[in-house]
Image (spheres, rainbow, N blue to C red):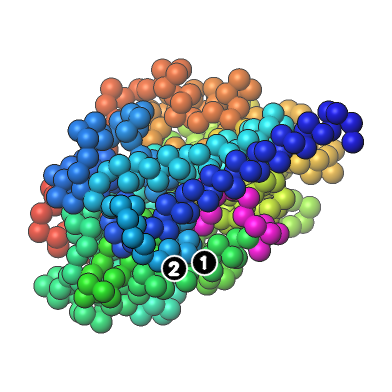
Amino acid sequence: MNRRGAAVKAKREYGQYKRDRARKTLREFLSMADDADFLALLWSVDALQSGRENRAKQYITYPKEAATEDISSSFYAYKWDFETLATVLLTSAKKPPKQGRNKHVNCKVWVAAAQAVNDLRDVEEAETALHIDGANIMLEMHRVAQRQFPWQRGYANPQHIYRYLYVYGQGACAEHFEQVHGVSLADFSMIALLLFWQLSENPWIVRPDTTSVGISKDTFNAALKVLGVTLAEGRAEARAMQGKAALSAGGAIARTIYQPCLLRQFPILINPAVGGRLLAPLPQLVLYRATAGLYYDVVRGGTALINDANARFEEYGRLLIRTYLPRFEVQPAHKYPFNGNPVDTPDILAKDGGNIVAVFECKATKLSFDAQFAENPMEAAKGAYDQMTKGIFQLWRFFSHARRGLFSAEPVAADAHGVLLTMETWFAMAKELQAKAMDDARQRAAADPNITDEDMRPIVFCSVSELEDTLGWSDEDTFLTLLARSAEERFRGWSIMSIQRDEKLKAQKVWRKFPFSMEDVMPWWSKIEDPNAKTEKLTA
C-alpha cells in the first residue's frame, strides 16, 4: 500500500474509532436512565419549548433561556432528535444500579436532556464524516428533509388533519380500519384528539373516562390498542423494528439518526408500574398516528385500499383548487381514444377562459422508512420513483396528444403547465432525484417519436401541503404566474412556497384560512363543547 492509501486507511480507521466512541458514550448515558423517567423528561422539554412552560415547570428545573420556541436558539432541542433519543433509549441495555454520585441520570433537570442531545450530535457528526462526501451530499439533503420537514410543518393543524382523514379516513379505508381494529374511524379520531389534548397537559395521565362523550370503555380500549403499548412491549417492538431495518440495509444500521422510531406507530406508552398511566413523550405523534399514520392500516389492506386512497387524493386536489380558485373550471380525468384503446388525461384539468391552462398528475405514493433514508433512494424505492417517472411521461404524452389533435374534447393552451402533485414532501424538493426522474422519463418518451421536445415541457413538482399553503395567498392569475416561474430551471428543487415568497407572488394581503369544515371528516366535531378551545389547540 502506498503512502496515500495508508493515510486514507488511517483516517477512516480513526473516523470509525470516533464514531464507535461517540455511540458508546450516548448508549452508556441512556443505559443509566430509567425509561419512564427519561421519556417523561423528553415530554417536559417538548412542553417547555412548545408554549407550555406552565406545565413543564412542574416537572423539571431549567435555565430561563431553555424556555424558548426559537429554533435557532442554542438552547432549543429538535423534536426529531427526541425521536432518535427515544429509539436509542429503548434499544439500549440497562446498566444495573451502582453506588456513587453518578449511579443514575437525574431526569428532573433540563441539563440531562441537553447532555443526551449533545451526545447524539457527537454521534451524528462522527457518522457524517464517514458517510458524506462531495459526491453524495445532495442525497443527504433528501434524507435530512425526510427527517425534519414534517416536524417543521407540524401535525396539530387543521390542514394536516383534514387532508389525511379525507384521503385515508373514508370509504373502503374506513371500513377496513373498523374491521381490523374493532373501532370506527370516527370514534378513533375523537379518542386520539382527546388523548392528544390531555397528554399535552401532563406527562402521565390516568385512562380517561370517555363515557361522558358517548364512547364506551371497550371502544376506548380498542383505540388505545392501536395507539399504545406498555414500556416492556415498546422495548421489544423497538428492537424488532431496528433489527428489521438492519436486515433491509444488509447489516448493521449505518446511521444512528436514521432509525425507525417506535413512537410513529405507537405514540403512547403505558406504564403498569403506576397503575397503567399513559405517556406520550411527543404528543404531536398521537395526531400523526391518527392522520398520516393511517397509511400503515391502508397499506396492510392491499391494492384495493391503496387505489381507493389514491382516488380520494385526486378528489381532494380538485376540491382544493376549485375552492381557492373559483374562476377555474376544475375537471377530473377524461378518457379519450388512442390507437383503439381508452387513455386517461391527467387527474386534474384546470380550465380558464375556455382553455385548459394547467394539468395535474397526482401521486399518493409514500416511501417506506428504508427508502426514505437509503444510501441510494432510487434503487431502494424503485417502484415509488418509477411512479414519478410515469407521472412525468403521462403529462408529456397528454401535451403531445393535445398538440396533435388526438385529445380534442377541450382546447389546451399552448403554454399549459404540467404539475406532478404528490401526497408527501419526499420528492418535491429533491433536486437530484427530480433530475434523474426527468432523464428516465425522456428515455421512456424516446420510444414514441411523436413526443417532441415541444411536448416535454418543464414539470412543476409540488406536494399537496405546499399547494394548500400557496393557494392561501393566491388568486388565479398569480397562481398561473407561480407555476410558470416554478418551471424555470433556476428554481429546480425549490419549494413553490419559497418561490412565491421570493418572487412576491402573493395576491392576498393576509393568508386565507383553511376553508373546509372539520366536521366533514370528523362528524363529532360540533359536539365538543368549546369550539374556540378546539381551534386554539389545533393551531397552537
Q: Residues within 10 Å of mark 1 (few under 14, many from 20)?
A: some
Query: What element does badge 2 sit on?
Result: helix
Percent position (x, y) of residue 49? 26, 40
**In front: 288, or 105?**
105
Query: Residue at the spot x=53%, y=54% of the render?
Result: 259
Magenta residues, start to end: 247-261
Query: The residue tagged with tag 1: helix, strand or loop?
Result: helix
Residue 291 falls in image quadrant:
bottom left
The image quadrant that residue 501 belongs to is top left
**What is the chief secondary structure element of the magenta stretch?**
loop
Relative to 327, is 70 on the left or the right? left
Q: Amino acid at mark 1?
A: Arg
Q: Is residue 167 visible?
A: no
Residue denoted by label 1: 239
Which corner quadrant holds the C terminus? top left
Where in the figure is residue 76, as x and y percent of width and height? 33, 35
- Give the quarter of the image for residue 57: top left
Task: Name the kind of residue labelled 2 in the image.
Answer: Arg
Q: Would residue 245 be counted in the magenta stretch?
A: no
Q: Which residue is mark 2?
A: 235
The x and y percentages for residue 362 are 55, 48
Residue under the image location 81 percent in, 40 percent down: 443
Confirm or deny contact between disc 2 and disc 1 (CB under 8 A): yes
